[in-house]
Every structure is written in structure tokens, then in C-alpha cells.
Amino acid sequence: MHASMPLIVTLAVALGAALVFGFIASRLRLPALVGYLLAGVLIGPHTPGFVADVDLAMQLAEVGVMLLMFGVGLHFSISDLMAVRRIAVPGALVQMAVATAMGAGLALWWGWSWPGALVFGISLSVASTVVLLRALESRGVLDTQNGRIAVGWLIVEDLAMVLVLVLVPVMFEAAAGAGGSTAELWTTLAQTLLAVGAFVALMLLVGRRVLPWVLWQIARTRSRELFTLCVMAAAVSIAYGAAALFGVSVALGAFFAGLVLRESEFSQRAAEESLPFRDAFAVLFFVSVGMLFDPMVVVERPGQVIAVTAIIMIGKSIAAAALVLALRYPLNSALTVSASLAQIGEFSFILAALGFSLGVLPSEGQSLVVAGALLSISLNPLLFSLVEPARRWILRKSALARALETRVDPLAALPQSTAARYLARQVVLVGYGTVGRQIAATLLAKNIPFVVVEQNRERVQQLRDEGKAAVSGDATDPTVLVQAHIADAGVLVIAASDSTDARPMIEVARTLNPAITMMVRAPNDDEARLLAADGAQHVFLAKNALAQSISNEVLAAMEKLAPARSGAARGAEGAAH
């Protein structure tokens, strides 16, 4: 019976084992991804007992790759990247180059070929988007400045890896076929880039118009299953078509399918409807990766496993932290970003599997990548918990760190010519996100002076270019509020999303300016009560503000209807008499 139903058996065993081990990992406060990988190890050919069909698992993994990349494209945000481009773009590219050099150098020292060493090094250079987003969400820092930097950094890494997945097979296959001929190699690369360019142009010029239109027509049927079917068909069909017609990878095809569908007004619904399928096949992908892992590599090559994990968790982290500090961001940002990147995941597995299939990466290389991922993902929550204690310890012990924190920053203080105009009961506005921008627009329309305090240096520079008063820095630091002239301010508005940072701001503002009026945004009732107890005179909850706005509109509409309602009432009363 098992022999006649290999697909059903593989699905049942893979999903069942993933559920059990994923649950155990979650109970141990580890990412569920660790459990999925261990489930694959258990049913793989390198451990005793039941062995699932590896070939079928690999085909299911290909679907998982398509849907993973489709999800990346569907959530890709140019605006998120542009908001932190000056740190994310150079930071991600330099950090990837440093990590690749470390990994490749280590592999060459072990005696591997240079193509295998290059694939291995790149595999260690890119962090997992899945792990990062879940880690940031669980700590409530996804919408903070540090969270936006980390996400922007990952977006750049993802884009770079999409390009790598396109070029790597072409480079190695062309080099092997050309027998080392440079001219033929460059010709093959040029042809590939032309094919990729043609596919991208077709998707951007035709796909971005046709696919949203098709999605709209399907949505008009009001059939949920047809809508879901349309989204899944677009993801898989475009991925296959890209490979069959243009010779590019299914990963690139699926990525652009998601990118194009993002243009539709139904993109949010497409993401929600396809999420169960993407999650299920992503689990199968991680299980299949675990099936390729040989646990004996930990016993036979413990030094290599430790070296790989050190590159991922220490080498990459130090490189990322140094780059963030070099770009004049605070130590807290440097430590958060470095902890975010101290792991590897889905792109590493995809590239390692590709290198193995091309015959350039040895089997132990793939096992080392999986071992490094298991260890780094498991230890990543610990690194996040150490960010704040490490920051305090470093500042206490290192004179250099204290000097970097207090160094002169041209964006950290208002220019004298600007400051002179903002010393008369101005508003200090902390946070320039969606809420902060709307508040600033209202103040500007009423000609009320205000100073923006924002950690995003690019946003501060843009505000100054527009002639607005803004200072860069973390408003929990008293010196930052001093630079915003909090002592002379009439109102402090804390519009930032992280309410835990509001308390030190309130304390500083009350100390330097006892008469100031403080208005704070709160995420829930409990936080609202705490902030009010800390001294904030006005605390705003999103749900209350929405209810008040709707109530005001209802009252205004009813006032307009009042004469008609009075007349109708008098008519009804007369008819009754």
C-alpha cells in the first residue's frame, strides 16, 4: 500500500512530523522552523527508521520555493526600502561581501573548489526573512526605527539573492561547458541577462496590467475558491513559464508574480488567501532540507560546525554592527541589527541545494549549512534578549563606545538660524511615521511651530531639505530632547508606536519643563493607564480615537437632518390627532 501511494505517504509523514516537532520547538520557546528541520532529519535517509521518498520531497520543496518567493514579492515594499536606503543598501551589500569572504576563505582552507567555496560563503551571508520578521514581531519592535532598518536590510539581501540564484547556475554551467573560455562565459552571461531583462520587462509592462485585471474579474464572481485558485495559479504558472520560456529560475518567476500582484487593490486579500498554502508548502520545504542533513557531520566535523556557526553569529554580527556605527547610528541600532542578522534560513537552503545539484558544493557543505542554520536560529532569541544588557555593559566599559554615542552629529542639533525661530512654546513631535506626518501637516497648516525628533536620519535630512525643523536621535536620551528645546516647548507629542519608550521621555520632559502639556499614543488600555500615571495629561488609544471620530460624524449628520426629523415628527403628531 505504501508503494502505491508515495505522494500521500510523504505528505502525511512530513506534515505530521513537522506538526509534532514544530509544537515541541514552540513549547521550548524556539522558532517552529527548528522543529520542521528536525522533522526532516528524522524521516530522512541519514537516520534509522522510516525514510520518506526523497525525490517526491524535493519536488514538493520546489513548490515551497516558488511560494516562498511569491510571498517575498507580494510583501516587497519599495517605500520600506527607500525609508532606510542609505543604511540598508550599503550595509547589506558590504555585510554580505564580508560574510561571503569569510565563508569562502574557510571552505578554501578546507580544500574545497572555488565554485563550492563561493556558493558556501554566499549561503552563510544572508539571514532568514521568516525568522527575522517573527522575532521582531514577538518583541514588538517591528514598527520601530531599528525594526525598519533590519527589514530594509533584509529586503536588500533578498534582492541580491534573487540575482544570485539567476546567475550562479549560468556562471558555473557556462564555465564548465566553455572549458574556461572567458569569451564564451561572458557571452552566456550576457544571453542570460538579456533573457532575464526580457522577462522582467514583460512582467512590468504587461503583467502589472493584465494580472490585476484578471484578479479583479475573478473577484467580481464573489467566489472565494476561484480567487484563491487564481492567486495560486498565477504564482506557480508564472514561475514555470519563466523557467520554460526564458530559462530563468522558478524563484525569480514566482518573485515577480508576487511583485506584480502587489499592484492590485486586492493584494492584501491575495496575501491572506494564499497564506495557508504558502505556509504548508514552506513547511514541506524546510522538512525536505532537514532530510538532506546528515547528523553525523556534527560528530565527525565538530570544529567545522563551530566555525560555520561562529561566522553566522559572530562574524556577520560584528560586520553589521560596525557598519551601522560607521553610518552614525546609535549603539542600540547596531546591536539590534546585528542580532537580527545572526542567523541563516530559506535562501541559504535554496542556494546550498542549487550548488549541490550543480555538483559544485559537496554534500558535507549542505549539511554544514543546515547545522549552522539549526544552531543560529535556536540561539537567535538569546541574542535578542542580550541586546539591552550588552548595550549598557559596552557603554560602561568602553570609552570608545561612549565617545561614539556622544560624537558630534550634524543632524543631532538644530542649526542656530533654525533654532531661533522655535524657542517660543513650540510643539516637540516625537516620531514621524503615519500618525506623526498627519499631525505635522495639521500644525503646518495652522502655522504652529514644531520640531520633529526622529531616529531615521534619512527622514530628518529630508525634513531639513524641506525647511522643517528636525533633529536626529533617540528621544529617550535626554540630550536629544534638549536639542529639540524641550525646556521651551509648549506641548510634547509622542506619536511613536513603541509606548515603552515613552516613559523616559515623559520623565525628562517633566523634569526640564514642569509646565509642558504631554500627549502620548498608547497601544492598549493597560499602557494608557501606565502612561497617565507617569504624568501624560492626554493619552490616545487608536480604537477610542476612531470611535470618537465616527461618533462626531454621526452627530454632525444627525444635526443636518434635525429640521427634517422635526417636521416629520410634527406631521406624525398631527396625523395622530
Image (cartoon, rainbow, N blue to C red):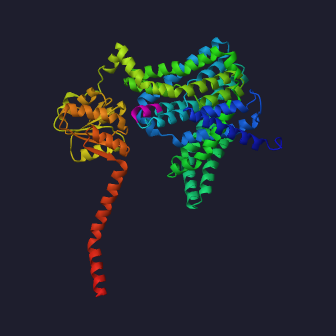
Q: Main secondary structure of the magenta part?
A: helix
Examine the rendered structure and indicate whether residue 318 appears above or below residue 234.
above
Q: Is residue 63 visible?
A: yes
Image x and y of residue 176, in percent: 72, 22
Judge by depth and name the residue closer to the eye, 248 or 314: 314
Q: Quadrant of the N terminus?
A: top right
In the picture, measured across the screen, residue 340 lies left or right of residue 518, that is right
Task: Name the image quarter holding residue 244.
Answer: top right
Examine the rendered structure and indicate whether residue 402 appears above or below residue 432.
above
Image x and y of residue 249, in percent: 65, 36
Residue at image coords 26%, 74%: 563
Task: Name the image quarter holding residue 577.
Answer: bottom left
In the picture, measured across the screen, residue 322 lies left or right of residue 454, that is right
The magenta-colored residue range is: 144-150
- Residue 322: within the magenta? no
Residue at image coords 63%, 39%: 282
Image x and y of residue 381, in percent: 51, 28
Residue at image coords 56%, 44%: 258
Residue at image coords 31%, 40%: 531
Task: Name the image quarter holding residue 53.
Answer: top right
In the picture, measured across the screen, residue 574 lies left or right of residue 327, that is left
Image x and y of residue 266, in percent: 52, 52
The number of callouts visible is: 0
Q: Is residue 414 visible?
A: no
